[in-house]
């Protein structure tokens, strides 16, 4: 892989366009609209502190060597705050016909206006958007309904990097793809984010129908990477149906996308009083995650599309039900090297199940430092001599990114069971409500040879789709609806928002230093 990567870098350096006139530019709320029209490849637009009206990133196309960057102040407060359209007729930041564009260090305030998504690329195949970076942003007050999304894509798109963002109390945190599978989200990287307290999903990546023909869309196999995130649910009711913290859907059976994969690792999945912490179908590998306090930790089964391949290894689980295969995975399965504290640790149709360590939740303190369902108190780092066994043959997983790194990003020994490859005192990030620090981002990057590819709708809100259902096969479908209800929301209290921004800035500085198939109409 590294040889191929080196060749790719050489080719790009010889053939990619050069940046002739990259510039730093400045804008404030009064001048932003005009400044956006002037941006060229390589430019960086610096936003002054203040409140900005909703806007569109339209017809801005950088290139792989010269991204266009729109950034607020890197240290806040003060901060650049983009306010939702209080009428609910437009999304707050809409991306149209743009590529190689980065949005950084801004706060998106949805004011709980149902229908005004925070960051959106919609409009289907007529909106050519790819290679987008959303980094170090804060998205708040997208809690108008379960269909109110903080980040949404509904166009065939690829190469997104969604990194180090904080999303608090959204209807749905990230909704990537469309409810009917028509607008695939391909080859993305979702890493180092905090998604806390949504009504529905922290994140859903939709299943994919046979892919449309879109110029530039990858046709070689790609991997979407979900790593080092913190996905937290709360106890709020879900009026449109209960949802897992995270759900990822399947891929086309043939043609482009049929060999694509998800790699989900190094994440904390915490709390779900009514559903799974993670539900998957398609082709997926799940390793070195910590799962705490859900109805079940992992549910792998046919959903909108079949479960094809699922490798679940080196995870730590503390939940009533652990790892469940509700369907067979005909292209291969593995449940290996996990540390599972549960009444029902591992169940379902699994051909390759070995080298796991299981015990009741009540006995977890025999094995780990401080088993608990309380953030800030829980510590699942192994006690000395308690979570080791014979060396595990991990050759099946050797092509996965960071397969040999534990939850802390440390080079692992395969004699440990669970997400941590160490014992005694945890040297890494204490499990909590914040952006994870200390995770190893690994070597994945743009491209289609095992890493995520990286490349950018119409204004207005869009509807979402029906939900996941649990292992018992219960249907969780919903009625239709556009999710466009407008409310007369008052602007968020400035002092409270500034205090939140200060807390998040401190957290970021610390980080730098240290269900069966639904049969009803689909929405979200």
Image (cartoon, rainbow, N blue to C red):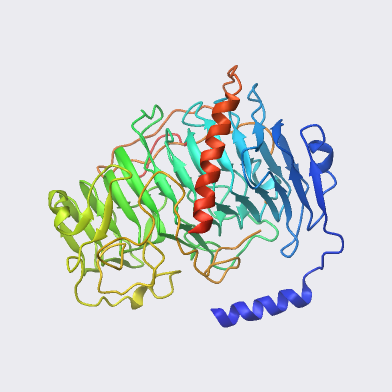
Residue 70 shown left or right of residue 258 in the figure: right
User: Which residue reaches farthest bottom?
Assistant: 3
The residue at the point 60 percent across, 63 percent down is 453
Give percent across and percent down for residue 63: 75, 61
Residue 461 shown left or right of residue 506 in the figure: right
The residue at the point 72 percent across, 74 percent down is 12
Query: Which one is nearer the viewer's eye here, 246 or 326?
Result: 246
- Would residue 463 be seen by someone viewing this image from the given angle? no
Residue 490 shown left or right of residue 226 in the figure: right
Please tell me whether residue 488 is drawn above or below residue 174 in the rendered image: above
Instruction: Give residue 393's quadrant in the image.
Output: bottom left
Give percent across and percent down for residue 501: 56, 37
Give percent across and percent down for residue 319: 23, 47
Query: Which one is nearer the viewer's eye here, 292 or 328?
Result: 292
The residue at the point 61 percent across, 56 percent down is 158
Query: Which one is nearer the viewer's eye here, 130 or 319?
Result: 319
User: Which residue reaches farthest top?
Assistant: 488
Please tell me whether residue 375 is drawn above or below residue 459 in the rendered image: below
The residue at the point 34 percent across, 78 percent down is 395
Give percent across and percent down for residue 358: 17, 59
Instruction: Give residue 459's quadrant in the image.
Output: top right
Residue 153 shown left or right of residue 308 in the figure: right
- Would residue 366 be seen by someone viewing this image from the given angle? yes
């Amino acid at each position: 892989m590294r040889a191929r990567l080196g060749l790719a870098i050489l080719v790009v350096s010889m053939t990619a366009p050069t940046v002739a006139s990259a510039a730093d530019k400045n804008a404030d709320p009064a001048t932003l609209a005009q400044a956006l029209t002037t941006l060229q490849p390589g430019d960086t637009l610096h936003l002054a502190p203040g409140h900005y009206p909703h806007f569109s990133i339209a017809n801005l196309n950088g290139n792989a060597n010269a991204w266009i960057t729109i950034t607020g102040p890197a240290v806040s407060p003060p901060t650049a705050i983009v306010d939702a359209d209080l009428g609910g007729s437009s999304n707050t930041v809409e991306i149209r016909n743009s590529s190689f564009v980065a949005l950084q260090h801004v706060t998106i305030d949805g004011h709980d206006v149902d229908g005004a998504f925070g960051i959106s690329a919609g409009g289907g195949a007529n909106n050519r958007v790819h290679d987008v970076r959303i980094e170090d942003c804060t998205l708040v007050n997208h809690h108008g309904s379960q269909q109110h999304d903080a980040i949404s894509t509904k166009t065939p798109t690829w190469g997104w990097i969604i990194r180090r963002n904080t999303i608090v109390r959204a209807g749905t945190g990230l909704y990537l793809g469309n409810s009917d599978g028509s607008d695939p989200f391909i080859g993305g990287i979702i890493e180092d984010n905090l998604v806390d307290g949504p009504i529905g999903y922290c994140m859903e990546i939709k299943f994919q129908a046979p892919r449309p023909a879109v110029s530039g869309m990858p046709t070689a196999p790609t991997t979407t990477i979900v790593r080092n995130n913190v996905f937290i649910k709360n106890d709020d009711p879900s009026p449109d149906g209960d949802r897992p913290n995270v759900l990822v859907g399947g891929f086309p059976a043939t043609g482009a996308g049929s060999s694509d994969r998800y790699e989900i690792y190094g994440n904390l999945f915490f709390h779900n009083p009514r559903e799974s912490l993670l539900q998957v179908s398609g082709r997926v590998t799940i390793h070195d995650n910590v799962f705490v306090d859900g109805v079940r930790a992992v549910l792998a089964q046919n959903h909108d599309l079949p479960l094809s391949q699922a490798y679940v290894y080196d995870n730590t689980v503390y939940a009533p039900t652990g790892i469940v295969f509700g369907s067979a995975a005909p292209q291969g399965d593995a449940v290996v090297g996990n540390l599972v504290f549960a009444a029902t640790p591992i169940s379902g149709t699994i051909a390759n199940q070995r080298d796991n360590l299981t015990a009741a939740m009540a006995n977890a303190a025999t094995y780990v430092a401080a088993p608990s369902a309380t953030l800030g108190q829980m510590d699942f780092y192994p006690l000395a001599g308690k979570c080791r066994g014979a060396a595990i043959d991990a050759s099946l997983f050797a092509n996965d990114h960071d397969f040999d790194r534990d939850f802390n990003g440390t080079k692992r020994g395969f004699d440990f069971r669970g997400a941590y490859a160490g014992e005694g005192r945890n040297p890494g990030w204490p499990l909590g409500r914040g952006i994870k620090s200390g995770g190893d981002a690994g070597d994945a990057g743009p491209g289609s040879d095992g890493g995520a590819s990286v490349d950018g709708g119409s204004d207005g809100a869009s509807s979402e789709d029906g939900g996941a259902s649990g292992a018992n096969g219960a249907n969780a479908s919903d009625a239709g609806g556009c999710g466009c209800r407008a409310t007369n929301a008052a602007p968020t209290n400035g002092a409270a928002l500034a205090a939140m921004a200060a807390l998040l800035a401190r957290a970021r500085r610390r980080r730098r230093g240290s269900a069966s198939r639904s049969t009803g109409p689909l929405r979200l």
